[in-house]
């Protein structure tokens, strides 16, 4: 059976991945978090669904003040010889502000207020209509949406004064992706969703587990497939968007000590120093033994050379002592 490619250097058996995918969908039990699978014309398996991304930024990001593709300009309509700005032209289409902002109820109320009551002058009617409009604006102030502003991260409305923003650490957002999108594609899609002007190469995805283990996701890794292998329970592992090269990877060997109590860590450190001291003593003892062995051998070699010289002098034989020693 073929393998499922997670990245350029990682892959898992297809039967193992399908078992994890079934466990993933069973965990959410017919919810919107379930992942769909389909086959392409080439017979490739494609996984689609929502992916939870957690914000883990330490620095501020730049947001667009308005969409560049949407052009907003007021349009003046003549009514009864007077000019009123009560419509907008957005991307070539006219939007009626009475219908877009005030709604049907407000328009009906305005039409009713324009009727002149017998015995009431036109000036009194205008004053009454103005007061009603003011009260309506105050009551509906929170519901009116400024067309020049756009909802941002966690409902944060921004303009030129708040175009620099730092998302709350650990806040989550959802992105619809597929197994045809690698990490770089998902980062680009996420930044476009919130109109972030920073380039995608400034960020990376990090897999952060409950054990504090942290691994940077390569640019060619498929996040939605990695999410399936991590498991559906996001308390055990999350995918964070963080600044690239500002965070170090934490292997499991190091992460297992991070969440321990300080007292336990101090005890481990004390044991380490005791073990280190014992090893130093052992090495020192071995070194002394080797030095004594070399000294004894050197003394023996010297006595041997002296003996050879004595014998050679008596036998009138010349020896190359340096060659013998060497």
Image: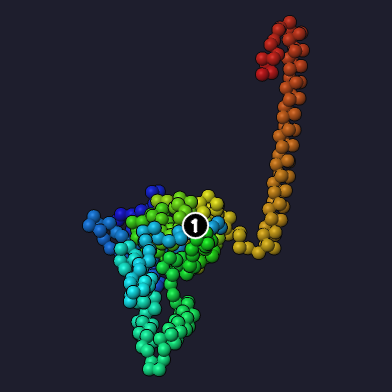
Q: Quadrant of residue 97?
A: bottom left
Q: Is residue 165 left or right of residue 116?
A: right
Q: Is residue 105 above or below residue 188?
A: below
Of 315 and 15, nearer the camera is 15
Q: Is there any visible trace of residue 6 in the rendered image?
A: no
Q: Quadrant of residue 79?
A: bottom left
Q: Position of residue 81 (x, y in %)?
A: 33, 74
Q: Is residue 290 left or right of residue 166?
A: right
The quarter of the image holding the N terminus is: bottom left
Of 234 and 168, nearer the camera is 168
Residue for point 46% across, 79% down: 137
Q: Residues within 10 Å of mark 1 (few under 14, many from 20)?
A: some
Element under disc 1: strand
Q: Is residue 275 above or below residue 265?
A: above
Q: Position of residue 119 (x, y in %)?
A: 40, 94
Residue for point 51% across, 54% down: 243
Q: Is there any visible trace of residue 126 in the rendered image?
A: yes
Of 172 and 121, nearer the camera is 121
Residue on which the image places disc 1: 62
The number of discs equals 1
Residue for point 72% across, 52% down: 274
């Amino acid at each position: 059976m073929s393998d499922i490619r997670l990245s350029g250097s990682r892959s898992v058996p297809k039967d193992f991945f399908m078992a994890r995918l079934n466990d993933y969908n069973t965990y959410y039990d017919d919810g919107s978090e379930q992942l769909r699978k389909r086959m392409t014309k080439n017979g490739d398996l494609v996984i689609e669904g929502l992916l939870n991304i957690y914000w883990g930024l330490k620095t501020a990001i730049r947001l667009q003040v308005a969409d560049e593709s949407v052009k907003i300009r007021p349009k003046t309509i003549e009514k009864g010889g007077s000019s009123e700005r009560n419509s907008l032209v957005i991307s070539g289409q006219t939007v009626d502000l009475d219908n877009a902002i005030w709604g049907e109820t407000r328009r009906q109320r305005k039409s009713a207020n324009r009727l002149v009551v017998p015995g009431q002058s036109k000036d009194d009617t205008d004053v009454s209509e103005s007061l009603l409009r003011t009260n309506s604006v105050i009551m509906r102030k929170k519901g009116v949406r400024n067309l020049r502003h756009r909802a941002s991260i966690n409902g944060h409305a921004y303009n030129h004064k708040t175009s620099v923003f730092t998302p709350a650490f650990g806040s989550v957002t959802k992105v619809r992706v597929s197994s045809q999108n690698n990490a770089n594609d998902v980062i680009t899609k996420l930044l476009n969703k919130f109109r972030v002007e920073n380039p995608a190469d400034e960020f990376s995805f990090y897999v952060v587990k409950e054990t504090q283990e942290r691994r940077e996701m390569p640019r060619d890794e498929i996040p939605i497939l990695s999410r399936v292998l991590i498991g559906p329970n996001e308390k055990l592992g999350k995918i964070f968007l963080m600044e690239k090269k500002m965070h170090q990877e934490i292997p499991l060997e190091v992460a297992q000590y991070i969440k321990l109590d300080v007292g336990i860590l101090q005890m481990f450190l004390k044991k380490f120093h005791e073990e280190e001291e014992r090893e130093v003593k052992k090495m020192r003892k071995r070194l002394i033994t080797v030095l004594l062995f070399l000294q004894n051998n050197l003394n023996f070699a010297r006595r041997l050379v002296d003996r050879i010289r004595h014998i050679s002098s008596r036998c009138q034989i010349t020896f190359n002592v340096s060659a013998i020693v060497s």
